[in-house]
Image: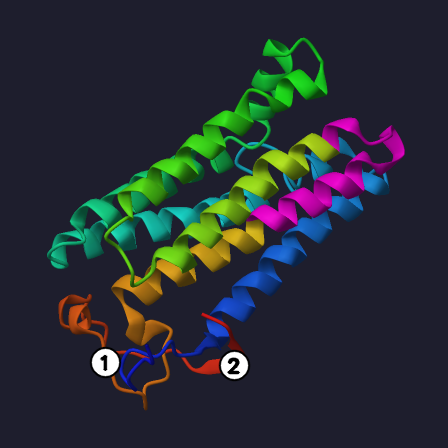
């Protein structure tokens, strides 16, 4: 059955702010990577580390998931019939934010429990990540509006946090810093993507072109946001 003009999936323009946030995240990670591979003094390298607890790079990523959690929670209070979905999204985003803020603390914990075995270490966080994605997928069985977008972001975050972390733990020592750089960038970029996905669901005027009307019925319950961020480039929604 063909979709009508209002039900057809629309392409979402990537807001300039999202591009700026992504570039800033990569820059922070690159600084930490550069300091690590050049053997910078600990007094400089530690505060600007890619993965140290509460470092600027880590807190920047944490801020994205925290903002997404707040936006999702606010959206859950205004959208009838979607409260469970957005509340679950807020809980999940808050959990990711707490892990991100701790930096490598969770990695050290897993390694200690796994007694230094990377494969055994993978068997601890992987089921947790899969369970979180499955839980959100199960809660979204009646959700059609933002299901694919949000679940894709959560899945990408799980791959970056668990999969790339495993790669970082098994590569030769000379490549550890580079592997960590790739891992941290993956987490940072998925953080930006997740925030945009949540805002598109609860405050679409922040990510949609202001000249385009909001055609979905539930848009009437979205957060009232007067400002519209300018668009930069097209991306599949």
Residue 123 lies in quadrant: top right
Instruction: Assess whether residue 173 is covered by the magenta stretch.
Output: yes
Task: Please state the horizontal and vertical placement of residue 66, each as a whole percent of the image.
Answer: 37, 46
Task: Please state the horizontal and vertical placement of residue 54, each as a whole percent of the image.
Answer: 52, 36
Q: Return the residue nearer the eye: 44 or 162.
A: 162
Residue 206 lies in quadrant: bottom left
Q: Quadrant of the N terminus?
A: bottom left
Q: CA distance from mark 2 to mark 1?
A: 22 Å
Q: Is residue 17 left or right of residue 6?
A: right
Prevailing secondary structure of the magenta residues: helix
Q: Which comes sooner in the sequence, label 2 or label 1? A: 1
Instruction: Assess whether residue 216 is covered by the magenta stretch.
Output: no
**What residue is pinned by disc 2?**
232
Q: Residue at x 37, y 43 (%)?
A: 93
Region rendered in magenta: 168-187
Depicted 107 relative to depicted 203: above or below: above
Secondary structure state at the residue bearing disc 1: loop
**What residue is pinned by disc 1?**
215
Q: Residue furthest toward the front?
A: 1
Q: Quadrant of the C terminus?
A: bottom left
Q: Is residue 237 left or right of residue 25?
A: left
Residue 94 visible somewhere in the drawing: no
Task: Please state the horizontal and vertical placement of residue 219, each as a whole percent of the image.
Answer: 19, 71
Comparing labels 2 and 1, the label whose residue is closer to the camera: 1
Q: Is residue 214 left or right of residue 184?
A: left
Q: Is residue 153 left or right of residue 146?
A: right
Mark carried by residue 54: none
Q: Residue at x 49, y 58 (%)?
A: 192
């Amino acid at each position: 059955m063909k979709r009508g003009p209002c039900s057809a999936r629309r392409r979402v323009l990537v807001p300039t702010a999202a591009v700026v946030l992504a570039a800033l995240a990569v820059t922070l990670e690159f600084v930490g990577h550069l300091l690590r591979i050049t053997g910078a003094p600990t007094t400089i390298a530690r505060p600007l580390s890619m993965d140290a607890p509460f470092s600027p790079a880590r807190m920047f990523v944490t801020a994205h998931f925290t903002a997404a959690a707040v936006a999702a929670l606010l959206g859950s209070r205004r959208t009838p019939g979607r409260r469970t979905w957005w509340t679950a999204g807020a809980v999940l985003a808050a959990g990711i934010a707490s892990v991100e803020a701790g930096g490598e603390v969770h990695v050290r914990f897993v390694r200690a429990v796994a007694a230094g075995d990377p494969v055994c270490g993978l068997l601890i966080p992987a089921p947790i990540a899969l369970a979180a994605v499955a839980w959100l997928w199960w809660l979204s069985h009646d959700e059609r509006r933002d299901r694919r977008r949000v679940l894709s972001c959560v899945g990408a975050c799980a791959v970056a946090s668990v999969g790339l972390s495993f790669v970082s733990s098994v590569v030769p020592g000379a490549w550890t810093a580079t592997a960590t750089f790739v891992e941290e960038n993956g987490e940072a970029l998925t953080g930006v993507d997740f925030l945009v996905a949540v805002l598109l669901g609860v405050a679409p005027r922040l990510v949609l072109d202001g000249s385009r009307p909001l055609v979905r019925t539930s848009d009437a319950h979205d957060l009232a946001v007067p400002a519209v961020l300018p668009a930069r480039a097209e991306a599949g929604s």
